[in-house]
Image: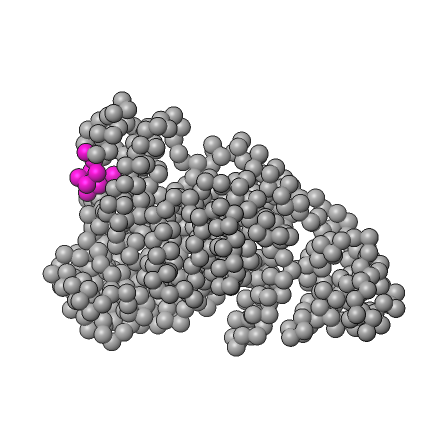
Amino acid sequence: MRDQKLHHILKETFGYDNFRFEQYNIINSILDGKDTLAIMPTGGGKSLCYQIPALYLDGVTLVISPLISLMHDQVMNLKEYGVEAVFLNSSQNYGEAQKAKAKILNGTVKIIYVSPEGILSGALAGFFDQINVSLIAIDEAHCVSQWGHEFRKDYTRLGELKERFPDVPVIALTATADAKTRVDITNQLHMKAPSVFVSSFDRPNIKYMILERSDEIKQLDEFIKTHHPDDTGIVYCLSRDKVERVATALNKLGYKAVPYHAGLSQNERALNQELFNIEEKIIVVATIAFGMGIDRPDVRFVAHLDLPKSIESYYQETGRAGRDGKASTAWMIYGLQDIVKLSQMLETTDADENYKKVARFKLDCMLALCEAAACRRSYLLRYFGEIGAETCGYCDSCIEPPTLWDATVDAQKMLSTIYRTNQSFGAGHIIDVIRGSKNQKINDRNHHALSVYGIGKDQPKEHWNSVLRQLLNLNYIHIKNWEYRSLALTSKAQEILTGKIKLELRKQDESVARAKTAAKQDKKRVASKTTGAAHGQNELFDALKDLRNRLAKEKNLPSYIVFNDKSLHDMCALRPRNASEFLMVHGVGQNKLENYGTVFIDTINKFL
């Protein structure tokens, strides 16, 4: 009986034929009254894990979400499926909040979205006592854990909900949590003997590319032109200034780009968010910690111009590409200054030493991913405790394996130069000495008289930057003083200086050449990495897309909320002629049939 009803809700409301990943088991765990932790990849259908129980159960489901914009999108989306949902957050004025509360008290609302700050406030506590709460869902649950990558203090108080609603099951959902973080989430939320479901972390449609930084705007332009000239994408930067600078540069190069960061006014952020939701071929340039919910399924690339501080952050951010299952790219450039900047930020915080120790480990893992000579995807999966194939055939390391070279002698030169300059100088000065620079600083310190002066003048600065960075990453050197960023040897350095080991390093990438080679290889792989059916109805698809976009504009909705591209491709493959056939299309439930069936069937019939 339960199984039949769940499948009925899945098909009649959401228009899907089958559950994905662990959705069915997660939903049944909730309906059995168990606290549940669900780890699912971005785009894996986490929302359905609480939306379907919300429609199955009597009463109301509370969804705690950290992003106002994401709440708005979720409510819009549910209304298109005929599900009554509201949000209660700081974006509403008094009248709008009262109207939403009246709907809730009338019993017409099934799902309420609220922020962690809101649900714990005195103002709403009394209100929620008046209603029958049947389920509590905590989205982006990694924010609960101090070992997660977006730790938020308000989330740590969410364990109080178990005291206020002791008999209500809690489901926590996130795309990124290693074993340590999972345990912390369940403890922080005071879960009682929780069921834990971990789906595969693999996103086979995403190609991973990581290059060394040389000229970031030129490299970014080359990447977009080569791989995604007509696509929507996200570019992540570490600072607000850089966001503005990169957005301006992209616009000058002829792209349609908008900035998004906390320094913009609320109106500017809202406008740029709306542009990103509704425009085709748009690029948003944003800070790593931007408060912008990304539900758009057709983001074709995510580019990082600065190194993320952890694998979790990287996985979460790259996961915003290709939510529709089509071939997409996660592209990143990095350099020595990233390591220094992130390490300095960590070491100068007030966090306790235990936290710093874990954060250092996470940064080391992120660096190891960048420097890895083997498959990127295999490394990512292993980090999350999942064993995959040794090679994926769809990352830059597999498409064009990096060249390794015997760097023992050059490493000895670098380590000797650091030692001979009394382990008191930063990377720039060390490289100037090794290359025999004639600048004043070297003369003032008499470093031109050292035996190591000029021993590396036959190699360019970029070469020594690469050697130094990899030695830092491999823990042969460390940053001794954060104020001056001076470098010193670790005990491991003796292994190289005494010739006990042979050191092989990754050769510096020829970024543009690698990007072009990878692009050619892509053509052979894209077909197997995309969910778009080979229906051959390109004119019909374009007509349906135009109709979808026009309807979305009329209703002031993002186009993907009306129908995503996967649904349009399905229409092209099935070419439904009537209502019953239209219901067979992926993502078409009863409400979407009533709202859009006639106009889409009419358009399809014109091409039959």
* Residue 526 covered by magenta stretch: no
> In the shown orientation, is residue 571 left or right of residue 142?
left
Q: Residue at x 47, y 32 (%)?
A: 527
x%, y% of residue 190? 35, 68
The quarter holding residue 325 reads top left
The quarter holding residue 402 reads top right
Give 159 or 127, whichever is nearer the viewer.
Answer: 127
x%, y% of residue 55? 21, 51
Identify the main secondary structure in magenta: helix
Quadrant in which the N terminus appears: top left
> In the shown orientation, is residue 265 left or right of residue 59?
right
Q: Which residues are magenta?
A: 588-598
Q: Residue at x 32, y 44 (%)?
A: 560
Give 289 or 531, whichever is nearer the viewer.
Answer: 289
The quarter holding residue 531 reads top left
* Residue 595 covered by magenta stretch: yes
Furthest residue toward front: 252
x%, y% of residue 139? 35, 59
Q: Is residue 322 above or below residue 314?
A: above
